[in-house]
Amino acid sequence: MRVCVLFSGGKDSTYALYIMQQYGWDIDSLVTMLPQREDSYMFHTPNIRFASTIADALEIPIKTKETSGEKETELEDLKKILKDTDVDGVVSGAIMSDYQKTRVDRICHDLGIKSFAPLWRKNQEMLVREMIDTGFRIIIVGVFAQHLDESWLGREIDHKALNELLEFQRKYKINIAGEGGEMETMVLDGPNFKKRVVLKKWNKKYDRDSGILHIDELMLERK
């Protein structure tokens, strides 16, 4: 099966890619949309410009396309780039978002190709633990929930952090996988990475209940 992977550099799309690689599928390319709006309904935005660098770390070709980020219009932009990609199917990292999954499914149906979502409806604690245990290094680059304060920006999601998130889930109903928009992530390393990503310069911008880790510079390091 020859597929492309919708890719943001975050944990879900990176883990979906890894699963497809474990299946032995042929990964044609990664596909990254670059929204011009920070409130895109479909696509990850914090530090998205570094998706190409992470693709270099994975040594997988990447295709990028700018999109207005406006609701529904951005779907047509995605459809255009997929139309020009010769694959049997498209892989996404959707876990719980019906909005995202149904729209990717519809685009694939229109193009006559398959839609695959290997993380769909999986237990979220199990998924995050699998990511950690498999060796993925995941940091939080955006927080958008009341109880995720500035200290979480740049923090690695390890077992200690996961246990704290589980406590927040119990007390405040925070979704530990960020499926309620509580957080955005970036993957720095993993078993399918040929090089690791090293942050060089960054700054935190936090206001009230939300914030972004703005990355100014990073580099790739041989493993």
Image: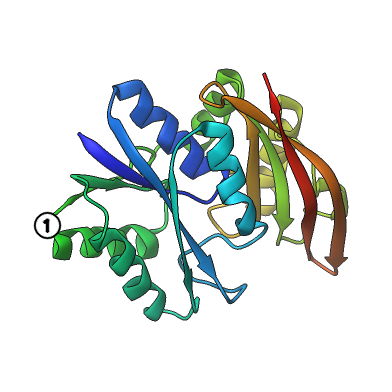
Q: Residue 197, position in %: x, y?
A: 69, 35
Is residue 164 found left or right of 111 in the rendered image? right
Is residue 207 found left or right of 223 in the rendered image? right
Foreground: 132 or 33? 33
Q: Residue at x 58, y 34 (%)?
A: 57
Q: Residue at x 20, y 33 (%)?
A: 1
Q: In the rendered image, which quarter is residue 169 located in?
A: top right
Q: In the rendered image, which quarter is residue 211 located in?
A: bottom right
Q: Is the residue marked by circle 1 packed among few (<14), some (14-19), or many (20+) residues within 10 Å?
A: few
Foreground: 147 or 44? 44
User: Where is mark 1, residue-wise?
Assistant: 112
Judge whether residue 34 can be spotted in this image.
yes
Q: Residue 141, position in %: x, y?
A: 72, 51
Above/below status of 176 relative to 63? above
Residue furthest left in the image? 112
Quadrant including the C terminus: top right
Q: Residue at x 37, y 43 (%)?
A: 29
The amino acid pointed to by label 1 is Gly
Q: Residue 151, position in %: x, y?
A: 87, 48
Judge whether residue 182 can be spotted in this image.
no
Above/below status of 88 relative to 81? above
